[in-house]
Amino acid sequence: MFRRSALYAQDEGNWQHFRAAEPESTLLARGDLHDQVFVLCAGWAFQYIQLSDGGRQILKFLLPGDVFSSASIFEAASHLSVKALTGVRIGGFARSEIREKCRTDPEAQSEIARIFVVEARDTAEFLCMLGRCSGEQRIAHLILHLVRRIAARHEITGQRYPFPLKQQHIADTVGLTSVHVSRVLSDLRGRGMISLSGGSIEILDLLALEQLGSVVL
Amino acid sequence: MFRRSALYAQDEGNWQHFRAAEPESTLLARGDLHDQVFVLCAGWAFQYIQLSDGGRQILKFLLPGDVFSSASIFEAASHLSVKALTGVRIGGFARSEIREKCRTDPEAQSEIARIFVVEARDTAEFLCMLGRCSGEQRIAHLILHLVRRIAARHEITGQRYPFPLKQQHIADTVGLTSVHVSRVLSDLRGRGMISLSGGSIEILDLLALEQLGSVVL
DNA sequence: CGGTTAATTGATGTGGGTCAAAAGCAGTGG
DNA sequence: CCACTGCTTTTGACCCACATCAATTAACCG
């Protein structure tokens, strides 16, 4: 998101934070107050909400360029937590600086707008998946969604892409058990749709996967 | 949302639209282009996405003061549809006018920010419900969420509030069948938690309902 | 009061959960 | 090189929340 944006394109001297973190470390905790807006610079991370029953719901996976939480652009308090999935590097802007930039720079303003619009669209689609679709469809959709973001402008098919999620992460995202995720994945493998192992994935039958994972008209 | 806001507090001469509509009429359809940002002035409506399998996922119920779609503040195209639940009155601002206002009025700016922050928080919570909770919990949560919004600053308990949703609407929101919604509702009634009939609701046992509907730590 | 839509109730089926054991698969150290 | 340990994934047996189908009943309305 911020990758090629007006905000991102400053030299490093402007970053207020620029640090690294280990996989599984918590980067941001629900309720924390920060006057910074954090951005993922390298690696994978995910937003989630911790539930009282011990489970967690993963809301979104973060790729380099993504803001930790879009709401953090406007608010110091975070309603969600963020964890590193792989090793990561993190940057941060002062919120005040962003506000200032927005006042003067229409480019930055529409970059913020883009972030919120994309988030609203993605979240709505995600809600549809959770509300109305089978486990198979949800997983197909998640895989497609992620691979499309990783692949960016490259071909989706005929190419292995990094895929650092454990099955538990998938489960916590699509609202299934890791046990069931395992079954669905091996089914998708068995039907020759994906090849997933060792932290990387290849889409073998894009069409079939899209037929599964597309619900919105 | 817009009710007491800087944007809302203009006299009617500034509204570009101000019209009424029947229950069940479509107020905004996915893909439509509008240079207006619509606001619900009176009645109930809901955002939804139509699915290819014939079902629909309701994303949010709109009360007076709510913008049809927060993304519409920034974008002409809508990724979701809106239908009237009861009879409604609708207002609209020119998007350009809002942009202008934001440039000059910090009040309006932070009103927009509030809309997006609240939306992000609510949607995240909703995702948790759909991903991780039982039908009973989802319904309890939905009821609480709505009654809290209707009641605003009034007491939630000891008071009947309008509740125009059919069971099908509840089902399309929480991802269940209307049949199952019926069973869950009569169970909640049987346990003395709610009294729901004839388009209005009363919360009889707030504590019990909150215990059911609260999942986030 | 008949006609239509919404809500309820019952019987039966299934996707996915739960529990538990086994099998892969690193890393670690002797 | 192999045994030891701690994950993650896989597999199997069994169970339950919720879907589906179908028939009633209740509410609404001209």
Image (cartoon, coloured by chain):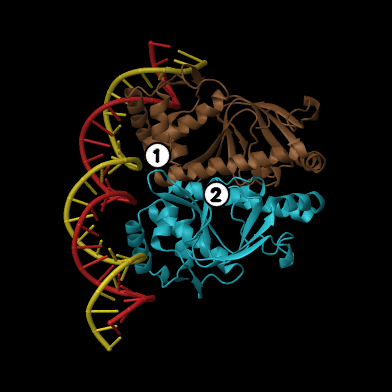
Chain colours: A cyan, B brown, C red, D yellow
Residue at 45% over, 62% down = A209
In depth, the one of D1 and B199 nearer the eye is D1
In depth, the one of A180 and B157 nearer the eye is B157
What mark, if any, has residue B176 been given in the picture? Answer: 1
Residue at 70% over, 62% down = A15
In the picture, measured across the screen, residue A168 lies left or right of residue A111, that is: left
Q: Residues within 10 Å of mark 1 (few under 14, many from 20)?
A: many
Q: Residues within 10 Å of mark 2 (few under 14, many from 20)?
A: some
Which amino acid is tagged 2? Thr
Dot 1: what SS? loop
Q: Position of residue B63 (x, y in %)?
A: 59, 29
In the picture, measured across the screen, residue A124 lies left or right of residue A15, that is: left
Q: Quadrant of residue B8?
A: top right
- Image mark 2: chain: A
Q: Nearer the viewer, mark 1 or mark 2?
A: 2
Q: Position of residue C15 (x, y in %)?
A: 33, 51
Query: Which residue position holds label 2?
Result: A123
Which amino acid is tagged 1? Leu
- The answer to whether residue A48 is seen in the rendering is yes
In depth, the one of B179 and A122 nearer the eye is A122
In the picture, measured across the screen, residue A46 lies left or right of residue B193, that is: right
- Badge 1 and badge 2 both on one subunit: no
Indicate the quadrant containing the N terminus of chain B: top left, top right, bottom left or bottom right.
top right
Q: In the rendered view, would you say A206 is above or below B204?
A: below
Q: Position of residue A115 (x, y in %)?
A: 65, 53
